[in-house]
Amino acid sequence: MKYQSKVRDLLQQRANIHTQMTELVDAAEARDEDKRSLTAEESAKFDEMSQRMDELDEQRKRLEDLDQREADLADAEKRYGPLTSEQRTDTGPSEFEKNLRAFLAGERRALTITPEGDQRFDVRQLRAIATQSRDLAKSPTTAGGHTVGTAFYAQLVDHLIEVSGVMQAGPTVLITDKGENLPIPRTTAHSTATSEIAEGAAITESDPAFNQIVLGAYKYGVLVQVSYELIEDTYIDLLGYLAMQAGRAVGNAFGTRLVTGTGSSQPQGVATAATVGVTGGAGVTGAFTADNLIDLYFSVIAPYRSSPACAWLMKDATLAAVRKLKDTTNQYLWQPSLQQNVPDTLLGKPVYTDPAVAGVAVSARSVLFGDFSRYFVRQVKDIRFERSDDYAFNADLATFKCVLRGDGGLADQSGAIKAFVGNAA
């Protein structure tokens, strides 16, 4: 990969900062065994290093994204043949870019690409199948509807996932052609076996309990307006700009509901649906200890913990607190990743952050842990991207609309995902 060495350098910088952070905490503990907290100066220094680590994460993600685009291009060449030297030159746009620019400028009313592949996929396959051509309009004959190419769809999805920790954590994603209600059986309790049955005695019946979760198709959308001066004169990556704006906006709206949605006239958020695993101690304004997180880990039964989609979910500010915690053997619970495309771990499980998760506070569900594949995300078709030249005609603006229809809910309420809750006392 082109940027692999730079990513390794960033990971090494993160590791060095982590070492400095642990040395700071260790020095504070060595100074006074009974004083576990940092001084104001030490705390400020720790927070500064933690922020620097987050900045390195952002740089790493950008480089990994560039590497992925290179991989997508190589995959496209395998599928459709190598690009010509004219298409690959750095001195001019590719054929796709020319067509896209014509579409953005209104010179071309449609850019037809035949969709391929199975429309049902898991979120972990999104990058892999993003190299397939996709029709992003609801219908080629819809007024204002247009089709755009593979790269734009891939960027839309990447930015949507980037701002949604739930989508990164590996939920089960169902893509449907229509938006009618989608009923899914939901487990609420498992069978229990009768022990030490006497000869000839009846076995007690113990049936699993089910109810039903119905996934609908709530709509999330954003309008992006671009001046014709920018369209005609720009030398920036306008494609990337539109994808970033639209993907992040839709991702923030939909992603927030996937965490905190009530389930009534909106998706059922994973934090809302999670079972309480551990409640914190009194008098600490909702804060957790290392023992609390270890208890939360083991409150989720082994079959869920062994799932590839078993992970932690919290917001960035909460993760900063986790970075200071040690177990009973004086080992830090949180471990930074030293490998590209591999998340950091907490007690051996990947950690994802989402700004919609509650912060540490009394009665707040600030940490989630469990098998996120038991959380279902339903999406209707692909993300729709359309253009109108008439909507803001008097302002000489081209208007682009990005729409996603979807829903979410926990399909297993027997304890697949559990939450730490700050003590209400």
Image (cartoon, rainbow, N blue to C red):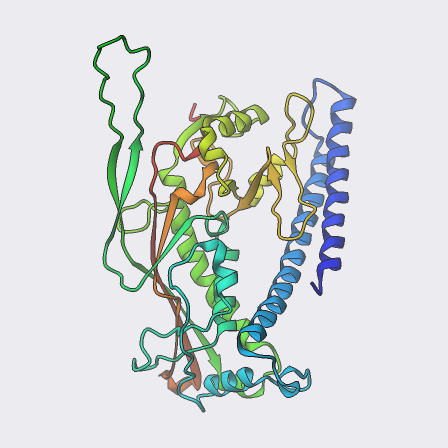
Measuring from the top left, give residue 226's x and y in whole percent. Answer: 48, 79
Say left or right for 277 vs 293.
Answer: left
Which residue ends up furthest to the front in the rendered image? Answer: 199
Quarter of the figure with residue 425: top left
In the depicted view, which residue is nearer to us: 104 or 187?
Answer: 187
Say left or right for 121 vs 55.
Answer: left
The residue drawn where x is 30% and y is 46% is: 263
In the depicted view, which residue is nearer to us: 394 or 73?
Answer: 73
Which residue ends up furthest to the bottom in the rendered image? Answer: 107
The residue drawn where x is 61% and y is 79% is: 82
Measuring from the top left, give residue 306's x and y in whole percent. Answer: 50, 35
Q: Quadrant of the N terminus?
A: bottom right
Measuring from the top left, give residue 132's x and y in whole percent. Answer: 47, 70
Quarter of the figure with residue 254: bottom left
Quarter of the figure with residue 174: bottom left
Measuring from the top left, give residue 248's x and y in whole percent. Answer: 49, 62
In the depicted view, which residue is nearer to us: 133 or 91?
Answer: 133
The residue drawn where x is 44% and y is 88% is: 106
Say left or right for 138 vs 231.
Answer: left
The relative height of residue 296 versus residue 93 in the rendered view (above or below) is: above
The relative height of residue 362 versus residue 119 in the rendered view (above or below) is: above
| Residue 159 visible within the image | no
The relative height of residue 255 versus residue 304 in the rendered view (above or below) is: below
| Residue 390 visible within the image | yes
The relative height of residue 351 versus residue 57 in the rendered view (above or below) is: above
